[in-house]
Image (tube, rainbow, N blue to C red):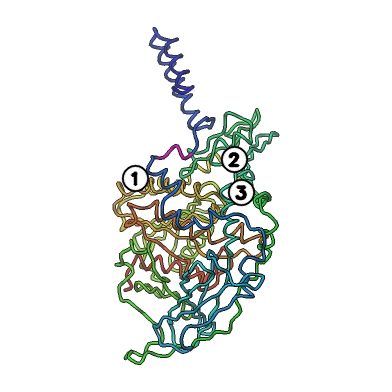
Amino acid sequence: MSFWSKVCLFLIIWLRGRLLCIWFGLVTCTIIIYLRNNVGYTTEKSVLNEHSPTEISILKSNDSFKKTLQIYQTSKKCNDAMLAADPLRSTIYMIGRSSVFLGDYIDFNVILYNGYDKPKNTGGDHLRARLYNDLLGAYTPATIFDHNNGTYTVTVQALWIGRAQLEVEVLYTKETIITAIRLRRTWDFSNILAIFSYKNYTDKTTCGPDNETVKGYSKESKLCNFSYWNNSQQWFCGRPKYPLSCNHWRAITRNWENFTRGMNTCEQQLNKRDRRTHIQSNITVEILPNAIDSANRTTFEETSISCSNYNITKLWFKEKPTGYYYKNKWILLHCKGLRSFNKECFRNKTLLFWGDSTLYQWFVYLKNKFLAVSEATCTHGQGWHDYQRCNFNKYNMTLSFLGHNIPVCGFKRKNLYNFFKSISFEKVIESESENNDGLLLVLHLYAHLQQYSFKHFAAHILEIKTSLKRIFKTKTNIKVYIKLPHAYRRLEEPIWKIRRNDFIGFIFTHIMRNIFKGILDRITVLDHMDSTIAKRNLDIHPSEEIVREMVLQLMSYTCTDD
């Protein structure tokens, strides 16, 4: 029996005999339990204990995930940076002729050498490759096979007529990936702080998803429990000093000064190679028209199946790149997508985005598109953190955005306590009417969780899955989409290969694929890793040109091209 349950029982026994007193005792107990659950003092167990044994096995280790990470998790710190793969010393050569036909597959061999000019005999380095022609606005990513002996096979399809240049990078050495994963497994959230203020009183305390870790930093047995407002992740902060209380939470701050404190000299040296990634080559491919093609096409198209009719479960298990750019428009290969903006796509629909500032870009793009052709009634907020909603009368369409929950970048509000109570996508969806053609929910988690232990990302996804299963029972006409991580490089940020390593996006995708088992056929995957690799996207916030193609992909799975 918990401490508060004992207090309640004691009060009822002590006050027994008078109905009025019993009533008083029950009311008092109710208030105590409410304060415990909602205002925030807690001694609860950590997040993993909230899940069933089956789900814990997914969180801690599932077979596929272990296989993906095994080479990195079992490796030791590097001791000699010269033993790592050196792109400047490595070589590429083409298998076969330099002229091919439209639709052909082209293979290249890559041999990695270390800093001593010796060929590597182990795998695990992360290569990226693409064919491109800037004049044509044509870009396609390659698939890469690791032979685990220092050699790699790069395979790419010839998808347009004309010339194409090959680019291959050793974006992350094996040693860099090992470092990035190790630091995330041991990171304790110690640089995330809650700021409490009231009148002239101010205090800062450490926060995190694991109550035992927070207790260790705060030296308090009782904490502020903000889990009830954080929705998809438990969240605790140290209790501020009297007269401040958990209700006086006003801001979140964070920095990453100590994130790389565990790096040794070898790891630091490798991460100074932040722009030394390209393997030098002058390989150009000439792509010729296919002699048996009577249509005289200039680009390759494999299917006529509409994306709106495609088996969406297959999207979770792609075997080759999803598409390519031609004239700076993204062309899907597995299904026929929309090539231009279709305003009728969202008529009589309610579209809700829940995510970060990169998904907010989609909201802004669509908002501006529809504001140009329709009057609207909009509620405005302070950027992506706040709930925003627009009703477009001409199309009977509602467009909404909710910022995702903690952890997020630092910001402040007059009352954060109330702010996080309003960010539940499940509550917003429940409040929506069934009187329209459908509800569309687009979810995205990535950048703000990218530097944390994978188990905490998995905990988020587990809670999201639980919410979705409840939603599916009551909202039969809802369509759910997951925007997967995209590629980017924060070149202006020190040690970006560790702190902003977008290889983590592949791991996050793997976690989601495993946790969402059982409802994969209810979730449409919006995969933009291929398109952002093909374009060699650098900014965490892609250009409007790339955002346009991302939104068109969402529309392709939602509507038919009339």
In the image, residue 80 lies at what x, y percent? 67, 61
Find disc 2 in the rendering and name its residue: 207
Q: Earlier in the sequence, mark 2 or mark 3?
A: 2
Task: Tell us which disc is closer to us: 2 or 3.
Answer: 2
Q: Which mark is residue 470?
A: 1
Report the residue at 33% width, 53% height from top.
519
Q: Quick one: label 2, few (<14), some, or many (20+) residues within 10 Å? A: many
In which quadrant of the rendered view does residue 536 lie? bottom right
On the rendered image, what quadrant is the C terminus found in?
Answer: bottom left
**From the viewer's perspective, is residue 189 above or below residue 527?**
above
Q: Which mark is residue 411?
A: 3
| Image-based side of 9 in relation to 311, left or right | right
Q: Pick whichever, 332 or 472, lies toward us.
A: 332
The magenta stretch spans which residues? 47-51
- Magenta span: predominant SS is helix
In the image, residue 354 lies at what x, y percent? 46, 53
Q: Quick one: label 3, few (<14), some, or many (20+) residues within 10 Å? A: few
